[in-house]
Image (cartoon, rainbow, N blue to C red):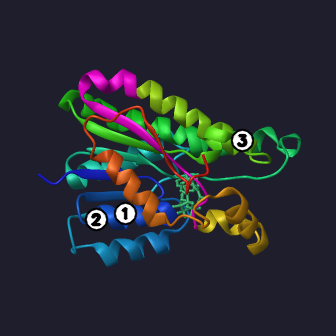
Amino acid sequence: MTKTIFITGGSRGIGEALVRAAAGKYNVAFTYCHNEMRAKEIESELDGKYGGILAIKCDVSSPSDVHTAVEAAKKRFKRVDILINNAGVSASGLLVDMTPEEWRSLMAVNLDGAFFAAREVLPDMLSRGGGAIVNVSSVWGVRGGACEVAYSASKAALIGMTKALAKEVAPMGVTVNAVAPGAIDTDMMKRYSPEEISALTDEHIPLGRLGKPSEVAEAILFLVEQPYVTGQILGVDGGMC
Ligand code: NAP
């Protein structure tokens, strides 16, 4: 039976690359938040080519949205075998300039969203005795980044969640891992000027270039497919860490 992968934030960037890479192997349910047109384009482009594909509107910071989205995936594909918590937002600036509302809203997407989605899919995985979850953390969650304190904290929390949940659900055959991408060429990097990108690649990335979204997607699928790997944080960062 074809397995089903549920990917949050599949309308752009790393999530879109993952939807495309996964579409040849799994039924794919993916969520979008603001970019409905793009999500529907991806859905119609891939529909019928491989297994099933379903785009679902979902703000991951809303537990009821996440519940409805997972139910929609289960209605279409019967079950969810794999969860990728990819949806994320970034924010830069000094911590002292950040408002409590800005802090909470970033945490709500990057951290709470992963909790809501894991909570929705895990009961079935545990009762079936198998499943895989991959969280998309960041190099900044490992190293910490100045002017990205909230983002770094949210991504470090995902690493803690990955390690703890991996131990909790391993006895029931479910794996939980994370990737920690470095600087990947997506919309998220657009807030940096070409000069800042050059400085970053020249001085901080040993492989000397930004990563491609498809390279992160392949690393995620690698983790999904390893039955004896759990609780691991895989850097996909050109040697940054
Ligand atoms: P991106 O191009 O900005 O795409 C972000 C994705 O998240 C979009 O699909 C977006 O959906 C979705 N999203 C945003 N807010 C959401 C919400 N409230 N609910 C549901 N979905 C939401 O980002 P990316 O670079 O591909 O990043 C993907 C993940 O990798 C993120 O977790 C990010 O933190 C992480 N990461 C990225 C980099 C990098 O250098 N790019 C490095 C390390 C880690 P809509 O477009 O439909 O709103």
The magenta region covers: 166-185
The Cα atoms of the two marked residues, 3 and 2, are separated by 33 Å
The Cα atoms of the two marked residues, 3 and 1, are separated by 27 Å
The amino acid sitting under disc 1 is Val
Residues 160 and 120: in front is: 160
- Mark drawn on residue 199: none
Count the labels in the image: 3
Looking at the image, residue 168 lies above or below residue 12: above
The amino acid sitting under disc 3 is Ala
Looking at the image, residue 229 lies above or below residue 137: above
Residues 159 and 211: in front is: 211
- Of all residues, the one furthest to the right in this rendering is 96
Q: Quadrant of the C terminus?
A: top right
- Residue denoted by label 1: 19
Q: Are marks 3 and 2 in contact (CB under 8 Å)?
A: no
- Residue denoted by label 3: 150
Ligand 1 has an atom within 8 Å of the beta carbon of the residue at disc 3? no
Residue 200 in picture, x, y percent from top left: 71, 62
Residue 91 in picture, x, y percent from top left: 72, 52
Neighbourhood count class around disc 2 (C-alpha, 10 Å): few under 14, some 14–19, many 20 upward? many
Neighbourhood count class around disc 1 (C-alpha, 10 Å): few under 14, some 14–19, many 20 upward? many
Looking at the image, tell me whether mark 3 or mark 2 is earlier in sequence order: 2
